[in-house]
Amino acid sequence: MLATTGSIKLAWNLQPVDTGSGRVDDFAFAFGPDGFPAIAFTVDSRTLKLARYNGNAWGIATVEAAGDHPADTCGRGLSLSFDHHGNPAISYNKATLIDSSFNVELRLARYAASGWDHSTIASAPSATGLGFFTSGHRCLKFGPDGEPAIVHRPGVSGVGVCLARKMGGTWSSNPVDPSGKGDEADLAFSPGGISTIAYDEDSSTKFAKLNGALWEISILPRNGRWPSLAYGPDGSPSIAYNGSFPGTIRPERTIFARLTNGAWEESEVENLGARGGPSLSFGPDGYPAVAYHVTTSPATGALKFAHFDGRDWQLEVAADIEYRPGGVCLLAFGSDGLPTCAYTDSLRNAPALAWKGTFRPVR
């Protein structure tokens, strides 16, 4: 039975996923086709892991580790998705020190019956170990053809947001917007299977839609950063992002924008000290919901959940958390129609879940 608007008001449950591995540098979250959550996370910038819940307990496995040199890294810039066969796939970066310089790779790990299959999408030398980066925590998606697509930025001067597609067994990467910064970008396929991307360019938020071989690009009305892109039941794209106060540049308000008749219509979710990127999803009632971080004092903050009820945004505190600039949270609705938010439990330095309903993850 799917949740109703009333059942969304249930209390939040909180639990860390893994507390014994080490410092968690990054994570990504998605529900599998079995209805249970999965979290990919990076430990000490060297080990990429995947945690999957099976209905009774979490199973945690190593996907790939960095090389032997202490400066080698693996697992930065995570994005997690499930393919059309229900298998997990993770996009990430790996840097290996060779002589006096790094070789940086944009990689995809995809699970199959025989285990993890690792492929390199692109690689380049780097003096610092920084180069190719997946552009956000939802930048990996599988298209209608069943093949993966990844939004990334190559870290090369004059080349901005790019989209890599695997077609006919071969990867190709093409620029979307040379001026797009794309530190956080979101990839979504429209209901008609068209590639669309939300991304930032310094203080501007942009939306790109592939029209044949060309990208059509529009700019949202406010200055802003960290967009999250999703399609509503009417097939229109919507973006949640941190937008500025009118007449200012600094993004501090959580904004919801919807493309209607070729123009972006905006509403403020909350105007209190937004920090880090929001995460947008649509509930079973067809209305949007947003998870985001806010600052409640110089040292503390809150993970918040906002659900639109058809008239107003209803706001809740899902978890009290330590203030962390640029903190990431990810929202998705489970098969029961209830929300789950993934975030970083800073006290235990571990990926954690806040969820509603009867789901009880116990490790």
Image (tube, helix red, strand yellow):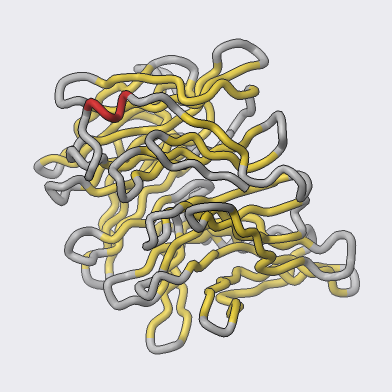
The structure residue drawn at horizontal position 39% and vertical position 61%, both measured from the top left corner, is 34
Q: Position of residue 220 (x, y in %)?
A: 30, 37
* Residue 191 visible to an observer of this rendering: yes
Describe residue 139's horizontal placement relative to residue 190 as left or right.
right
The single residue placed furthest to the bottom in the displayed view is 168
Please give the count of numbered marks on the rendered protein. 0
The structure residue drawn at horizontal position 44% and vertical position 88%, both measured from the top left corner, is 169
The correct choice, above or below, for 308 with respect to 78 in the image is above
The structure residue drawn at horizontal position 45% and vertical position 44%, both measured from the top left corner, is 201
The single residue placed furthest to the left in the displayed view is 261
Q: Position of residue 229 (x, y in %)?
A: 33, 46
**Looking at the rendering, in which quadrant would you find the N terminus?**
top left
Describe residue 10's horizontal placement relative to residue 19 as left or right.
left
Q: Position of residue 124 (x, y in %)?
A: 67, 72
Q: Position of residue 73 (x, y in %)?
A: 76, 61
The structure residue drawn at horizontal position 21% and vertical position 38%, both measured from the top left corner, is 258
Describe residue 258's horizontal placement relative to residue 101 as left or right.
left
Q: Along the line of sight, which residue is nearer the eye, 38 or 221?
A: 38
The single residue placed furthest to the top in the displayed view is 297
The single residue placed furthest to the front in the displayed view is 56
* Residue 157 visible to an observer of this rendering: no
The correct choice, above or below, for 148 with respect to 204 in the image is below
Quadrant location of residue 148?
Answer: bottom left
